Image (spheres, rainbow, N blue to C red):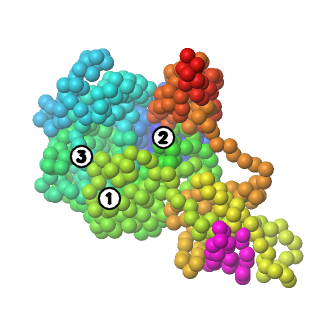
Amino acid sequence: MTKFSSVLVANRGEIACRVLRTLNSLGYRSVAVYSEADRSAPHPALADHAELIGPGPVNESYLCADKILAAAKRSGAQAIHPGYGFLSENAEFAEACEQAGLVFIGPSATAIRAMGNKAEAKRLMIEASVPCIPGYQGRDQTDEALCDQARQLGLPLMVKAAAGGGGRGMRLVENEDELANAIRLARAEAENAFGNGELILERAVVRPRHVEVQVFADCHGNTVYLGERDCSVQRRHQKIIEEAPCPVLDPVLRQRMGEAAVTVARSINYQGAGTVEFLLDANGEFYFLEMNTRLQVEHPVTEVITGRDLVALQLQVAQGEALGFSQQDIQWQGHAIEVRLYTEDPAQDFLPTSGEIALWHPASGEGVRIDDGIQSGQLVSPFYDPMVAKLIAWGEDRDSARRRLMAALRDSCLFGPTSNKAFLLDCLDHPEFAAARATTAFITEAFGEGVPMGPDFAHSDAAISAVLACEYDYHVFMDKAVGVSPELKNWSNARPLMARKQYTVKNQQFDLHIIPRAQHHYEVSCDGLSIDVEVLESSDPIHRLKVDGIPYRVFFHAMSDAEHYVDIEGRCFHLEDAIRKAGSSTSAGDASQVIAPMHGLLLEVRVSPGEEVRAGQTLAVLEAMKMHYEIVAEADGVLAELLETAGSQVAADSVLMRLDVGAASAEASDG
């Protein structure tokens, strides 16, 4: 192994920031790469040196191995850390680094290949006597062969991309009539995300826990496991809450799973950090899923309970040094839980959101760790994964960690693109999660087949928003006023000055009248209710208030005198004052217009002008943030106009096509 002192991080966002922080703390010279879409991102500024590598799309920047290697050469880097995602599990990239005289901080290309294909990995694990789920990992990849094998396995089953991970190219099939479409969609996603459309089939394990084991190995024959993580709380097969240790593992089962994971690593002569993933059923039986030959997104919970920096260990092992500890030296202290903060809209089927971050204010405090890669004023691009931060909390036991994490979530504020913050709080507060009974079925069972419609907006919330908007108005006025004492604010020699605000939230209008009673003390009337609001303390963006005697801690951020954001007890709202914004209006869409739900690439258009369509029929397929979304008709009709074609980039809320709603049924009745 070659010693190095300068490391390029071939990644972005919170991933790059997390790796860069360890590099900087250990005195390495750090190099970042960034795309044109990431000019305002924090990670380039966190490094000692940064290199621009291309436009926003990943296949023109972060996935271009030649551009990464050229940046390493220009910057004088001696090693490359791939982070997690992008090129981290790309065997060809690992080989290219070696050929360029650079140290690839990760396992060998041989090990990456052995585990990079789920079909081949499963065949290897069966040979190594590691428990595996019954399934099909054969080389005949025709749709007919896959359908035949699926029928032999029986339903429910999983259709999974043989290459890659992260929930992409994965479909659960519960009914036979869903099978052909699931295979087609999984293959298309896999080809697009990983350049490989090979699929495997696995019998679905009903209501399992998803438990993964962190392994580490050096080149001196030392291989250890650093405990496990429970990653059962998932949505669309992507983890959103992870914790360590797994709350249902006893020492005997922990040792069995840990030793099985070590067997997996040793069977392929693995070196570096890796994660072996298992499904654990209700009877305590576990089955090999896959091995991720990289650091995982959720590695911080392992770091917190072991006290070991896994990136520092990667740097150590990559230079040929021994781990310096044995299995017996590893101790686990307390409990840690992590949540992934995504810019996505739970009320819109969790569609990714993008746009400018108006405000990012992360929490801090004892036992709290925030791994983020965003800052206020930054643009969240549609080109990348929507995860923008991770919040981690440690406690002496699981419940103290859970409570501390909920407090950290409430005390973190993200204004701009809609996020899943309120949904995460609902998950953490759910009785099943609190009782450590969550399985991979948790989201469906806890929230039903529908999606959360977003937090409720009460009259008290409207009153808080209106008062803080008035305080902002007065503050702006006083800044502009000349020769007026602050003590005279709100003063009148006649009746008290009254302000009026008007908000519309979820089709409900709040018409508020705000009357100052004393400095920072107001009476708000709305719909016959009288609400007493007192502002106790303001330290932008945090405000402490009393509403009818009840204390509140609120985040408030004004974009203008007519538009502001407010976060009340973890519930975030974007509000516009209709009175200040007089003359503006928004018209709701109708079924005749087919709208793009987000920025993305229109991969496929399945209908033609003049064609009859039915409600629920798939009209087009959109790719955004590395996922595929089917756009369906909301009503019966005839396609009257096609405004976008396959292969075009489309903007959120743009009209893709227009339907002549009801035309089909009218024509049928005429006949």
Question: Disc 1 residue type?
Answer: Phe
Report helix, strand or loop for mark 1. helix
Question: Disc 2 residue type?
Answer: Asp
Q: Tell us which disc is closer to us: 2 or 1.
A: 1
Q: Tell us which disc is closer to us: 3 or 2.
A: 3
Residue found 77% across the figure and 58% down from its top: 580
The reply to whether the magenta stretch includes residue 522 is: yes
Q: CA distance from mark 3 to mark 2?
A: 26 Å
Residue receiving disc 1: 433
Q: Is residue 386 visible?
A: no
Q: Give the class, few, some or many, for how many residues have Cα within 10 Å of label 1's Cα (few <14, many ≥20).
A: some
Is mark 2 in CB contact (under 8 Å) with mark 1?
Answer: no
Q: Give the class, few, some or many, for how many residues have Cα within 10 Å of label 3's Cα (few <14, many ≥20).
A: many
Q: Give the class, few, some or many, for how many residues have Cα within 10 Å of label 2's Cα (few <14, many ≥20).
A: some
Is mark 1 in CB contact (under 8 Å) with mark 3?
Answer: no
In this rendered view, identify the residue nearer to me: 579 or 300. Answer: 579
Q: Is residue 288 above or below residue 148?
A: below
Q: What predominant SS class does the magenta segment belong to? A: strand
Quarter location, residue 96: top left
Q: Position of residue 206 (x, y in %)?
A: 23, 43
Q: Position of residue 583 (x, y in %)?
A: 79, 50
Q: CA distance from mark 1 to mark 3?
A: 14 Å
Earlier sequence position, callout 2 versus callout 1: 2
Residue found 62% across the figure and 65% down from its top: 462
Q: Which mark is residue 385?
A: 2
Question: What range of the chain is rendered magenta?
Answer: 513-542
Quadrant of the frame with the N terminus? top left
Residue found 29% across the figure and 34% down from its top: 174
Report helix, strand or loop for mark 3. loop
